[in-house]
Amino acid sequence: MFFNSSSFLQLPGQGDSDTLSVSLSFRTWNPSGLLVYTALADGVVEVGLADGKVTVYINVTQRKNTRIDISSGSNLNDGQWHSVHLNALENYAMLTIDGDEASTVRTAIPIQITTGGTYYFGETLQFSEAALEGSGLTL
């Protein structure tokens, strides 16, 4: 439960894993905002809302800077509860909204993900910008 735009929840995750799996529920009237942020061993993952759609940005800097963008859903800023499930492993990422198979977006990713360990839920964009300072990555 968050009371304002600067509230967040920090949870430990499993570090050094090649599988990323995040599920959450949210409701909002805001068309845009950051839902989840986590640093990878060599990049970042952000799950957010942009113009009422769930967007996922995976940025990995293994050999060269590689960014993967996927999105799904529409009008998710209707004040109703919505669920998000992101699964990334081996060579693909999959995003499902509200458990609806028709909403599932699957994309090939030409990178290997290695998780970093800590997940931030509901944090503001200011956190991710601060966390990226000095990392060579940009949002």
Image (tube, rainbow, N blue to C red):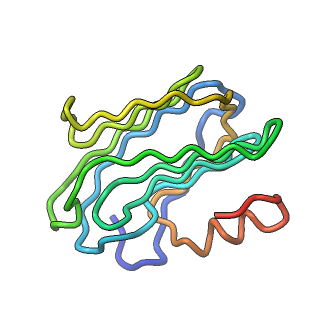
In this rendered view, identify the residue nearer to me: 63 or 122: 63
Q: Is residue 104 left or right of residue 93?
A: left
How far across and down, in percent of the image, does residue 85 sit?
A: 36, 38
Residue drawn at x 48%, y 33% is 21
In the rendered image, residue 127, in percent from the top left (x then y), is placed at 62, 70
Q: Is residue 126 above or below residue 117?
A: below
The image shows a total of numbered marks equal to: 0
Q: Name which residue lies at 44% across and 45% down.
A: 70
Relative image position of residue 107 (x, y in whole percent): 46, 31
Left or right side of 75 for 89 = right
Q: Is residue 137 above or below residue 7?
A: above
Q: Is residue 1 left or right of residue 63?
A: left
Which quarter of the picture shows residue 120? bottom right
The quarter in which the C terminus is drawn is: bottom right
Instruction: Residue 74: give x, y in percent of width and height.
Output: 22, 56
Q: Who's the residue at 25% across and 68% down the image?
A: 28
Q: Quadrant of residue 15?
A: top right
Q: Quick one: quadrant of the N terminus?
A: bottom left
Front residue of this view, candidates 43 and 12:
43
Q: Residue at x 59, y 20 (%)?
A: 90
The extreme top residue here reads: 90
- Above or below for 84 versus 9: above
